[in-house]
Amino acid sequence: MLLFIPIYLIIRLVYIKKKNKSIKLINELILMFFCIYCWGVVSQTIIPNWSMGIISETGEFYFNINMSNSLAKINIIPFKTLYEQIFTNNLNVSTWKKVSVLNICANIFLFIPFGFFIHVMCKNSINTKQVIIISLITTLIIEVIQYIIGRSADIDDIILNTIGVLSGYLTTKYYIKK
């Protein structure tokens, strides 16, 4: 993540210089934090599982990317996974309720900043319906990519992510008006 910041700054400065644009520090900071946030979301949702290291017995370097689709599932039934997580127990996981709550909260909280950034960056040029559409499209793209790279895709994630975006957007809209 720290490597991303200097790369972003170099690319952005070259772009500004090439376009001969004037800069407003606050706008540049908001854009930089938005890009950092987006990179964080990508790193948690889209980048495939990978590992690298050195095999201790042989001293050989290895780099593995796991993109198999053997364990990937698709759930297109709204609230099915949420219902299972809230009202059932998984005997294979001793802390099932904690894992379920963490999954639900993470899906909401991960996208609250997206709603904040939509409001701050678009100001009054966007309405709640457009925010919902942007959120649905963005999270649908993430879920499709997750399935393609061997992870599960779930409509409940899209619903929870959209709740997060709306929470961030409406909270920011409310507090910026005051």
Image (spheres, grey):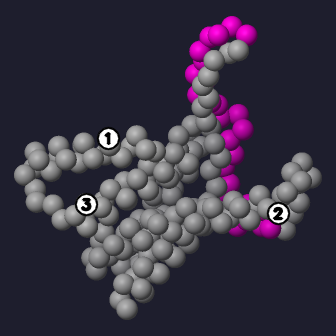
Q: Please name whichever residue, 32 or 164, is drawn nearer the observer in this view of the structure.
A: 32
How far apart are the two marked residues, 3 and 1, measured between alpha carbons? Answer: 15 Å
Question: Which residue corresponds to the image point at 77% horizontal and 58% vertical from the top-left?
Answer: 99
Spot the residue most to the bottom: 178
Q: Residue visible at 28% across and 80% down? A: 124
Task: Bin the neighbour count of mark 1 within 10 Å (Cα to Cα): few under 14, some 14-19, many 20 and up.
Answer: few
Identify the residue under disc 1.
Answer: 7
The numbered mark at residue 36 is: none
Disc 3 designates what residue?
28
Which badge, 3 or 2, comes first in the chain's sequence? 3
Image location of residue 178, percent across then percent down: 37, 92
The total number of labels drawn is 3
Q: CA distance from mark 2 to mark 1?
A: 40 Å
Answer whether residue 139 is magenta in the image. Answer: no
Residue visible at 19% across and 47% down in the picture:
13
Q: Amino acid at mark 3?
A: Glu
Q: Earlier in the sequence, mark 2 or mark 1?
A: 1
**Left or right for 76, reference 173:** right
Disc 2 secondary structure class = helix
